[in-house]
Amino acid sequence: MSEHTNNSNQDSVISVRAMDIITAIVFLAIGLTVMVGSLKLGASWGSDGPEAGYFPFYISLIIMLSSTVTLYQAAIVNKKKKTESFVDRESFKQVMAVLLPAIVFVLGVQLIGIYVSSVFYIAIFMVWLGKYPLWKAIAVSVGVSVALYLMFEFWFQVPLPHGSWFNPLEFLGVQ
Amino acid sequence: MEEINALFSGFAVAMTPFNLLLMLVGVTLGVIIGVLPGLGGANGIAILLPLTFTMPPTSAIIMLSCIYWGALFGGAITSVLFNIPGEPWSVATTFDGYPMARNGKAGEALTAAFTSSFVGAFVAIVMITFLAPLVAKFALQFGPPEFFSVYLLTFCSFVGMNKGSPFKTISAMMLGFALATVGMDTVTGQLRLTFGNPELMRGFDFLIAVIGLFGIGEILLSMEEGLAFQGAAAKIRGKVVLETWKQLPKYWATSLRSCLIGCWMGITPGGATPASFMAYGVAKRVSKDGDKFGTGQMEGIVAPETAAHAAGTSALLPMLSLGIPGSPTAAVLLGGLLIWGLQPGPLLFVEKPDFVWGLIASMYLGNLAGLFVVLTCVPLFASILRIPFSIIAPVIIVICAVGAYTVHNATFDVWLMLGFGILGYVFKKLDYPMAPMVLALVLGDRAEDSFRQSMLISQGSLDVFFSNYLVAGISSIALLLLFWPLIGKFVGKKKAAAA
C-alpha cells in the first residue's frame, strides 16, 4: 500500500493532505451533531443524577478538540504532504470497480432479495473483471447462492432477505 | 489445585463428540478465514455467529473460539508461502518465512510457524487457567469507579501504545463511543441521537462495524493493490516436521521471551500485531545471528509467531475475568456471549463455572486440533489462495452482506456495513486505528454506565476516581499512558539535548 501513498509521479485523484483535512472536517461535523443532540437531551446534572446527554456531550467535546488538532496539523504543519497521493487514478478505478457494483448489489438485496442479487453480482463481476466465460460465471454464482440457501435457511434456519419489492423466487417456494 | 479440578471438569464438558466435531469444523473454517484476503478472525466470527444461535452456549463458544485459533494459524500460511500477511500480526512472519520458502524450505518454515504458534498459545492458556480466576476473584470487589478506571486504562493504553498520531487515535475511539450512545439509553430509557429515524433505534451494532471495517475495507484495499498470488510450493512431509521439531528446542530462550512479550501485550490491549513486531525486534537484537535476520532464519519465524499467538490468546484473559476484551476478535467473542445472555466478567466464574472451564479446556484442545489440521492440510489451504481474486472478492462481499443482515435481520444494516467499509478504507490509508474504535463501540454502554454510577456515588465529582489506592493507582497509570506520547517526546528531546 505504501508504494501507492508515497508515489507522487502518478496521476493522483486526491492528496493525503486534502483527505486528512476532509476527514477532520467530517469528524468536526459529527462532533457538532452529537453535541447538538446531547444538549437537546439534556447534558447536565438532573434531579436523579447525570442526564441522558451527559456522557455523549463530553464525547463530542473530545471529538471536536482532537479533530481540530488533526485539522491544524494537516492544513498547517504538514504542508509537505500536499504532494503525497492518497489514491492514484488507476487504483481509484479499481476500488470503484468493486464499490459501485457492491452498492448496486446491496440495493438488489433490499429490493429483490439476496439470492438473485448474488447470482447477478458474482456472475457480472466474474465476466467483467475476470473475463470468465458466461457458463463458468453462472455455475459459480448459482452454486454460491444455493450453498447460502442450504446453509442458512435449510440447516441453520436463519432467514435471509427475500426482497421487499418483489420476491423473484416465490415460484420456487422460497417465502 | 482448585483450578486443576475445575479444569478437569471443563475437559469433561468440552470432550463430548459433538463438541470435538465442532472444534475441527471451527478450526478448519478459521484457517480458511485466515487464509482468505479480506476475511479475518474478527469479521469471520461476526459473520458465522448466527450459525451458532441454535447450539447450546458452551458448544457455540467452543466453535467460535476455534474459528479464532484457526484464523491465528491461517495467517502464517499466506505469510510464508505467498509473502502476503493474511492478518496484520503475521506481517513480521513474512520477513524470514517467505525467504525460507523461496530457498525451498517452505515445509520447515511452516512447521516452525505452526509449532511456535501452538507454544505461544499454550503458554498463554496455562496463564489464563491460573490467573483468570484470581483476577476475577479480585475484581469481585470492584465497584463502578474501579471498573471505569479499568476501562479508562484500556482506552488510554491505545493512545500510549499506538505509533501514529495520538489525536487520530482519540478521534477514532471517540467516534466509537459516540456511535455506541445512539439508540436506547440503558439508564433512563430515552432514545438518544436517533434524530427521529426508526432504523437508528437499534443503535449501531459493533458486529456490523467489524464486518464493514475489516471485511469490506480490506477488500477495497486489496483491490487497489491488484492482488496477484504467486506462491512457493506447499507440502509438509512427516519427516520434515520431525526434523524441524528437533531443531526448535534450540530457540527456547527466544520462545520464552516472545511468550512473555505476547502475554503482556495481550492482557494490556496492545494486541497481537505490536507484540509480533516487538518480539521480532528483540530476537534480532539478542540473537547472535541477528544480522542474518530477514534472509530466512528460523528464529525470525519463531519469535513473531510465538508472541502473536500468546497475545491473541491472552487477550481472552481480561475478557473472561473483567468483561473487557483485549482485541477486536475477543470483542466479537464477547458479543457472542452477550447474545446468549452470559455476562462476561468476574461473576461469570461464580455463576457459570462449567461454561468458563469448558471454554478454557476447549482452548487447550482447540489449539491441539488447530496444529493437527494445519500440519496435515496445508496444500489444501494454499490452493484456496490460487482462486482468482475476481471470484473471491464478490463472494466475500456476498458473505459479508449475509453476515451483516443476520445480526438483526435488517437490510439497513447491510447499507451500514458498506458505509463502515468505506470508512475502514479511508481510516486505514490515513492511519486512523480501527481497533480502539471497535472496542469503544463494544464497551461504550458499559463504560458509560460505570461512569454514571461513579458520578452518582460522588455527586458529580471526579475525585471518586482517586478515592482509594486501587482506583487511584489504575487511574494514574491510565493517565500516564494517555500522556505517554507527550512524555516520550519530552524525554526524547532531553536526551537529544544531553547528547
Image (cartoon, helix red, strand yellow):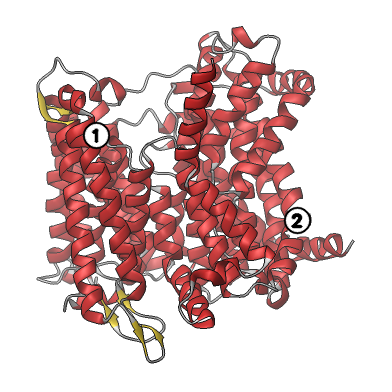
B65 to the left or right of B429: right
**Label 2, label 1: how far apart the Cα atoms are:** 47 Å
Image point 71% across, 10% down: which residue? B288
Name the image quarter holding residue B141: bottom right
Please provide percent x and percent y for residue B439.
44, 57
Question: For the N terminus of chain B, which image quadrant?
Answer: bottom right
Please provide percent x and percent y for residue A137.
20, 39
B183 to the left or right of B10: left
Q: Chain of mark 2?
A: B
Q: Which mark is residue B131?
A: 2
Question: For the C terminus of chain B, which image quadrant?
Answer: top right
Q: Which residue reaches farthest right?
A: B1
Name the image quarter holding residue A52: bottom left
Q: Can the viewer see residue A160 in this picture? A: yes
The residue under label 1 is B390
Name the image quarter holding residue A138: top left
| Circles 2 and 1: CB atoms closer than 8 Å | no
* Nearer to me, B425 or B353: B425
Packing grade of label 1 (10 A; few <14, some 14-19, many >=20) is many
Q: Which residue reaches farthest front?
A: B498
Q: The disc labelled 2 sits on which kind of residue?
A: Leu
Q: Considering only vertical position in the picture, is B94 above or below B222?
A: above
